[in-house]
Image: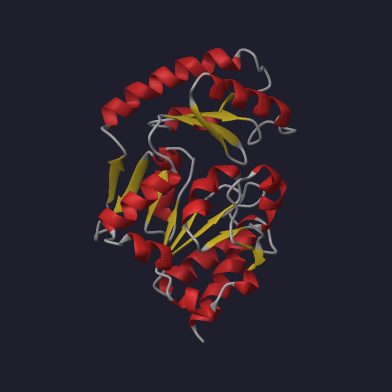
Amino acid sequence: MSISALSALANHDCQGLRFILTDFDDTLTWEGQLPVETLHALAQLEVNGLKVIPVTGGCAGWSDMIARSLPVDGVITEGGACFIGKTADRHLTYAFWRDEFEMRAEQARLLAQVNQVLIQFPRLRLARDQSYRLTDVAIDYAQDITPPAIEDKNACLAALIALGLNAKASSIHINVCSQGYDKFSMAQRVLSQVYGLSDAEQQQQVLYVGDAPNDESMFARFPLSVGVANIAEHLSIMRHRPRYQTTQPGGLGFAEMASFVLSARRI
């Protein structure tokens, strides 16, 4: 599927939106920072009645901070393992894909397997935020490793998959989690059970923004999908691509998307 410029996104599609779901690393951030333009865009989307829900492979501890401090309606964290939502009085709630204690036990088993694989790849290591994860295991290849260990990442990913593990690469980590869920499956559950959207309404009222191969489950199922400009480096290996693409990278591209959508909604 060819990707269209963001300018091809129709006004009537923008006007029907109620939700913007978005990846975080290198989609809301850029070069490790949250740009001022991104924060302004998030605030403007909230003021204009659009609910933003980050959908991230990031750890639950970090996602708790995001949910508490940014103008978002909640966070789907650890690749779909948990939804951190907000009550009317802004207290946080945690809803796990399966029983929390069952998922914590599975995480311990995954960690033991990952540590054995990592012996083969001395440049790679567990992500610094592993202690703040509740369900999955993250391997750093490009967050705190310079230069990024791309060849080792690819080989490690192949080794994990060969073991039958559910492993996917983001722009900075390899994430390893239990089978049975991904970003889309939890997004669909949240949209239907928390917000009451039918499948048809999800297709019309939700736009997804991402930057990497671990966003493919979202690109495949949400017809209104946008890739920020830096997704270009991954497109050759992606089966499911976004429908539209920004001209700016990361959080600057997200701000570009927000500005376009809000302008279209005023017409």
Q: Position of residue 8 (x, y in %)?
A: 62, 73
- Relative depth, front residue between 131 and 119: 119
* Residue that appears at 50% across and 61% down: 223
Q: Give the answer, above or below, for where 204 lies relative to 234.
A: below
Q: Quadrant of the N terminus?
A: bottom right
* Residue that appears at 49% across and 40% down: 58
Farthest front residue in view: 1
Quick check: 237 left or right of 222? right
Question: What is the total number of numbered labels drawn onto the structure image?
Answer: 0
* Residue that appears at 63% across and 55% down: 250
Q: Give the answer, above or below, for where 170 lies relative to 192.
A: above
Residue 8 visible somewhere in the drawing:
yes
Displayed quadrant of residue 90: bottom left
Q: Position of residue 164 (x, y in %)?
A: 49, 22
Quick check: 158 left or right of 77? right
Quick check: 52 left or right of 229? left
Residue 90 visible somewhere in the drawing:
no
Q: Give the answer, above or below, for where 79 lies relative to 104.
A: below
Tell me which colouring the rendered structure shows. Answer: secondary structure
Quick check: 50 left or right of 251? left
Farthest right residue in view: 147
- Relative depth, front residue between 12 and 131: 12
Q: Position of residue 163 (x, y in %)?
A: 52, 18
Q: Position of residue 184 (x, y in %)?
A: 43, 48
